[in-house]
Image (cartoon, rainbow, N blue to C red):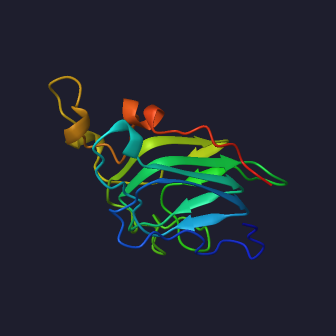
Amino acid sequence: YRNTGGVTNVLTIDGGTNFTGSKTLYVDGDVWINSNIEYAPWANIDTIPVFRLIVKGNIYISPNVTRIDGMLVAQPNAGAKGLISTCANSDGSNANLASNGTIGECASKLVFNGAIVAQRVKWLRTFKTLSDAKNSGREPYNDSNAAEIINTSPDFYLGIPADPPTG
């Protein structure tokens, strides 16, 4: 897919929780993700869902997105590209700063189940503060006060088929 109109709503997965099968989406241009991407439950190794978004440009994630399952890759092209922004408006601007300079819309946790690859990542979520952290050692992954979390489990590697790009 070639996106020549700047940041647009290129990727939307309706329903959010029923992704099955294997899909790799290649985009030449910027992408704005404005809904959750969640895998359906799977029962055996042959039914592990796989989603990969490979972008030659930037990936912007809407403030309302709280979960992304799969792999996001933002590759640089001409100019300053190769960015993943965890909290952005549809025009690519930072959604976490209100016009009066206070914290904006991204006071929610964003969980990646898979991997992200980029030249730069703008970690812009503001879920909690340092004073909310657990003081009894390391925070457990499933009860973290972190604003952005990346979980990479064995199913991520088991479900990746060997399907190189065509065309």
Along the line of sight, the residue nearer the viewer: 147 or 3: 3
In the picture, measured across the screen, residue 4 lies left or right of residue 119, that is right
Q: Is residue 154 above or below residue 76?
A: above
Looking at this rendering, what residue extends furthest in the right direction? 78
Q: Is residue 48 above or below residue 25?
A: above
Answer whether residue 31 is visible to the viewer in this image: yes
Corner quadrant of residue 60: bottom right
- Residue in the image at 57% along x and 67% along y: 32
- Please state, as top left, top right, bottom left or bottom right, where the C terminus lies in the image: bottom right
Answer whether residue 153 is visible to the viewer in this image: no
In the picture, measured across the screen, residue 35 lies left or right of residue 22, that is left
Residue 27 horizontal/vertical position (percent): 69, 60
- Please state, as top left, top right, bottom left or bottom right, where the N terminus lies in the image: bottom right
- Residue in the image at 40% along x and 59% along y: 19
Residue 150 horizontal/vertical position (percent): 40, 40
- Residue in the image at 19% along x and 40% along y: 143
Along the line of sight, the residue nearer the viewer: 158 or 113: 158
Residue 84 horizontal/vertical position (percent): 58, 52
- Residue in the image at 72% along x and 56% along y: 57
Residue 54 horizontal/vertical position (percent): 64, 51
Q: Is residue 15 above or below residue 124?
A: below
Q: Is residue 32 above or below residue 26?
A: below
